[in-house]
Structures are given as structure tokens and as C-alpha cells.
Image (cartoon, coloured by chain):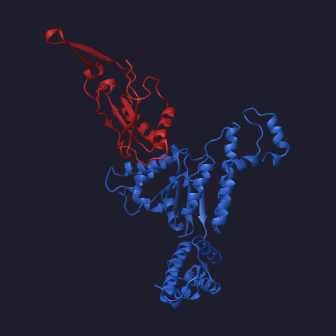
Amino acid sequence: MRITQGCFSFLPDLTDEQISSQVQYCLSKGWAVNIEFTDDPHPRNSFWEMWGLPMFDLRDAAGVLMELNECRKVYGDRYIRMSAFDSTHGWESLRLSFIVNRPKDEPGFHLERHEASGRNIRYTTRSYAADRPEGTRYGGK
Amino acid sequence: MNGSAGPSAAAQDAGETPPIERIDLRREFAEVGIGEVLDQLDRELIGLKPVKTRIREIASLLLIERLRKRMNLTSEVPTLHMSFTGNPGTGKTTVALRIASILHRLGFVRRGHVVSVTRDELVGQYIGHTAPKTKEILKKAMGGVLFIDEAYYLHRPDNERDYGQEAIEILLQVMESQREDLVVILAGYGDRMDKFFASNPGFRSRIAHHIDFPDYSDDELLAIAELMLHDINYRFSADARAAFVRYIALRKTQPLFSNARSIRNALDRIRLRQANRLVADLDRELTADDIMSLEAPDVLASRVFSGTFPK
């Protein structure tokens, strides 16, 4: 099951050229672009690991693409996303975030129904990938 | 523009299908606007004949390269990395800025900004510090020009564990693999750069354009001085100009002479002395002319004339 988080996730995967123009848009707005990766696809997982520091003061997307390719070399089997941080007063938060790399095979989620008291049902979603320990999901060693 | 081109333009209009077969060079030249930049270079930079010729050649090559691309004649992106060698104050940094705008107009760099760095900004202080630092600078320079001043400091032959070597390796790799994203310009004094290239042959071969900046002649230095004064709304009186001609001749024979930079410093000191002379007489009524003109005594008070200039 293809996970859909952040911008453009209902579109086909972005090509490098498309990623590059999105990044250029962010840079033209003065946002700092950051690369993060994870192998836990749960939508409530907000702790993605950072690939280096957020990139401030860049003028051209080629620099970001260079880092992305480095990151793909190491973590090409995981989810990689880019986020753009707006540091202007009043915003000081993320303005845009989109997935730029995903595992070849995404096994999807198991829906667990927990029968609570009084015939109540509580739902839990659990990623099949998360059955295996971190770092070994999605074909990692 | 079409009118001046005459019949060739008409022929071109008739058969306009890609790939283009004929190109009106004059129109292309005007469209790109490098004519302006080159003229500005001629106007604002005095002397530097070999440098200007070389820049013209590079600009022409790039223009033709651009046309070739439009005509679908396959060609590789030309190597644009350059090295500027010359004595202090011969205008290396100024020319680097101009080069960036020429390359930008021709579309060979996307943004046309210049990131100017020295060893400090590229080389780290401990193991594992250099690579991220160098990459950070490279990322900032992407789409523009990376200007490395006094590049020979990157290589310290006396210390084989110096982190400079690591920075050099990363630079070389990016210079080779991302030629279309980044232009690197190395600058430094001639003899030391020669040694630097001798010990890093990889650099020498990856740089296509080695441009040598000659020293300025006395006349050129005077012209530079007058241009600088004109820009800040000052001028020499006739006597002061004669005195300054003598100043230049004397200053050149003294140590630590750094061409245009020495001239700028001399002018700053002359302005100080002029201001002091004017303030000394508070009862006098000044005209704009008085405030603008530098007089001979302002120039002649320099240590260069009294022979007490530090050796």
C-alpha cells in the first residue's frame, strides 16, 4: 500500500527534475530545505531522522539535490522526505514537506480491532514493515 | 534589430523550423547582452589587456556554444573553471565578479552569484570537520561561482596530515562531476600558485583557463586613482595630480606595493589630510569646489616623499 503523506503524495513519484523545481521554489521563498529519512511509515511517526543539518543560505537547488543523492546512496531503501522551514517571524515553522524516495515494496498496514468493555471497539494501525527491527525493514541488512 | 540585419533575417523568418539552420549572430549577441558587460569591463577596468582579451574569447566561445546547442550540434559543456594569478591589487576579485555576470547572462551558471572563500571556510579544525564544511560551501555556491582566494593555502606541503588535502579532493570531485552546476575560480599570487599546481596536478588539468594579471603601469595607476576619486566625488587639482604622479613613481619602488589597493589606501590618507587642512581654518567659508578638490600639500605630506616610509 502506497503511503500518502505530505504534498504531492497522490501524484506519481516526482522525477529529479520536478524535485529540483520544487526545491527551487522553496529557496526562492527563502525557506531552508531539510532532508529526513525513516523506515517507520506510520502516519503518527513524527520523528524522522535528519540527514545533516537544514540547508540555509542556498541559492540553487543543485546543492540540495547533491545531498539527496548522497542520502539515497545510503538510505535508498527507506522513505526520504524534504521539508522547507520558514524562519520568518510569525511563521517559524514548516511550510512544505514532500516524500522524495520510498521503498520498492510497501507492505501496508494491519488494522487491529481491540474489543473494549461494553462492545466498544478501539482501532490500532500497525505497519507490517515495523514487525522487523529498525534498520532491517524494507530489505536493509 | 531586424532592419540592420537585412536580407539574411528575411531568409531566416521564411524557414523557421527547429532545429534552426541559420542564426543571426548580431541579434543573438544583442539578445544575450554580454556586449554591455564587456563594454562595462572595458570602461571600468583600466589596463589588464591580456585579461580582457581572454574574457572576450571566453564570452565568444560561450555564445557560439549556446548557438551550437540550439542547432542540436552535440557538444559537451565546456570546462569553465579558471585560475587567476597576479600580484596583489591587480583586480582578480573584481574580474571574478564580472565573470560571474557574463556566465549568468550566457546561461552557463543559473544564478550568477559569487561565493568568495579562503582556506578558513573550507578546511576544518579536526578530523571529520572538513568534508561537511567544504560541502556546505559548495552547496551555497551551486548555480554560481565559487571564488577561492589565495588557493595555495589549501595545500600545506610541510604537514602531510593537513586537512587541506581532504578539501582539495572534495573540490576536485565536484568540479569534475557537477560542471554544469558550479564554476570554480582559484586566485592567488603567481609563483605560489605555480607551486600549488605543481603539487596538485589534478587541479591544473581540471582548470581550462589560466589567466595572468599583469602589474599596472604608472599611467594606468593614475587613471585608476582618478576613476576612484570620480566615483566618490573628489578631484585632484593640477598641482596635486603632478604630485601624485611623483607619488606613484616613488611608491612603486618601495616594499609591499600592491597596485590598485595601495592607490586606494593612498587616496584614503590624502582625503584625511585634506579634511584636516580644511578643519584647521574654521573661519574660512568653503565652497563645494574647496571640499571636492585635493591640493598638492595633501599629497606631498605623505611619508613616501620624506623617505621615512617603513622598509
**Left/right of residue A123 with respect to residue B179 in the rendered view:** left
Vertical placement of residue B216 versus B237, above or below = above
Image spot of residue B299 (x, y percent): 55, 85
Spot the blue chain and give its letter.
Answer: B
Spot the red chain and give its letter.
Answer: A
**Left/right of residue A111 with respect to residue B295 in the rendered view:** left
The single residue placed furthest to the left in the displayed view is A117
Q: To which quarter of the image does residue A106 belong? A: top left
Give whichever of B2, B197 is nearer the camera: B2
Image spot of residue A25 (x, y percent): 49, 39
The single residue placed furthest to the right in the displayed view is B7
Vertical placement of residue B84 versus A32, above or below = below
**Left/right of residue B7 with respect to residue A44 in the rendered view:** right
**Left/right of residue B140 with respect to residue A136 in the rendered view:** right
Give whichever of B35, A72 is nearer the camera: B35
Image spot of residue A98 (x, y percent): 41, 31
Residue shown at 58% from the left, 72% from the top: B228
Image spot of residue B124 (x, y percent): 36, 55
Count up the numbered dots.
0
Residue shown at 59% from the left, 58% from the top: B98
Residue shown at 65% from the left, 54% from the top: B58
